[in-house]
Amino acid sequence: MERYVIYNVDHRVLICRQHMCGIGPNNIDRHFWEEHKDMPLETRKDIVTWSQTLLLCEVEEVTRFQERTSHINGLEIRNGYRCNFSECGMIKGTQSGVQRHCTEHKWDGFVSGKARFCEVKVQTFFQGNKTWYTVLLIIH
């Protein structure tokens, strides 16, 4: 199984090696049927059967934000942007996304010499509408 997936015990998430993202426990069969059609059917069935023996978190239960100094094995490392407003810390995947977010604070430009946002290295377990980020390293 480890050729295709990684079971992250700390976060209780199954990670697809090829796509470098987590797979929600209710989507494992669909993920392998739709995204891995070139994989032998028996292998896909074995992965689904094996995954049912694991203690997996529901997508909503996975830690949403955690500042780390090391990466989570199997997940893609990408650029992200973190809001610097007070204690907000919201993380967005695009610069335009964090700029739109910062306008919610009525914060324009620099305040006390501090930029509205900074670039960070991030990882996310899930893609699509269940995306939230884990910060790896803040780049100042």
Image (cartoon, rainbow, N blue to C red):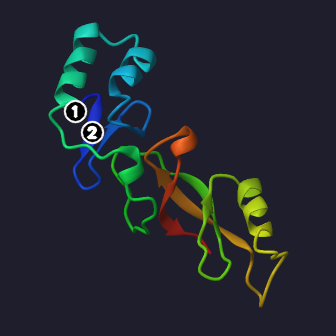
**In the structure shown, which secondary structural element does the residue marked by tag 1 occupy?**
loop
Label ID, residue 2: 1
- Measuring from the top left, give residue 7's x and y in whole percent: 24, 42
User: Callout 1, which amino acid?
Assistant: Glu
Viewer-nearest residue: 72 or 84: 84
Query: Residue, x 44% and y 16% (percent of image)?
Result: 34
- Relative height, residue 45 to residue 124 (above, below): above
Compute the Cα span from label 1 to label 2: 6 Å
Drawn side of residue 10 relative to residue 73, left or right:
left
Label ID, residue 56: none
Few, some or many C-alpha atoms within 10 Å of disc 2 (few <14, some 14-19, many ≥20)? some
- Measuring from the top left, give residue 121's x and y in whole percent: 54, 60
Question: Which quadrant: the C terminus?
Answer: bottom right
Quadrant for residue 109, please give it.
bottom right
Query: Residue, x 25% and y 43% (percent of image)?
Result: 56
- Residue at the left extreme, as displayed: 53
- Measuring from the top left, give residue 120's x and y in whole percent: 58, 64
Label ID, residue 6: 2
Query: Residue, x 69% and y 52% (percent of image)?
Result: 94
